[in-house]
Amino acid sequence: PEGLTCLVTMEDISTDLGNY
């Protein structure tokens, strides 16, 4: 499920940007 991993990674990045 590489696609799912990609989506999860994008969500993590968005969360990091939101924290900043």
Image (cartoon, grey):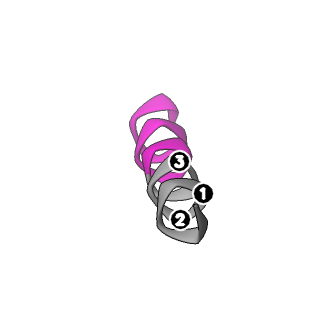
Is residue 13 located in the magenta-colored stretch of the structure? no
For the record, the magenta segment spans: 1-10
Dots 3, 1 in contact, CB < 8 A: yes
Residue depicted at x 46% and y 57%: 11
Say which residue label 3 marks: 13
Q: Which mark is residue 15?
A: 2
- Distance from disc 1 to disc 2, alpha carbons, whole Å, reads 4 Å
- Distance from disc 3 to disc 2, alpha carbons, whole Å, reads 5 Å
Q: Residue furthest top?
A: 2
Determine whether 3 is above or below 10 in the image.
Answer: above
Q: Under tag 1, what secondary structure?
A: helix
- Distance from disc 3 to disc 1, alpha carbons, whole Å, reads 5 Å
Residue depicted at x 50% and y 30%: 2
Dots 3, 2 in contact, CB < 8 A: yes
Say which residue label 1 marks: 16
Residue depicted at x 44% and y 45%: 10
Amino acid carrying mark 2 in the image: Thr
> Picture coordinates of residue 16 (x, y %)?
60, 57
Q: Under tag 2, what secondary structure?
A: helix
Amino acid carrying mark 3 in the image: Ile
Q: 5 left or right of 7? A: right
Q: Under tag 3, what secondary structure?
A: helix
Q: Nearer the viewer, residue 5 or 9?
A: 9
Amino acid carrying mark 1 in the image: Asp
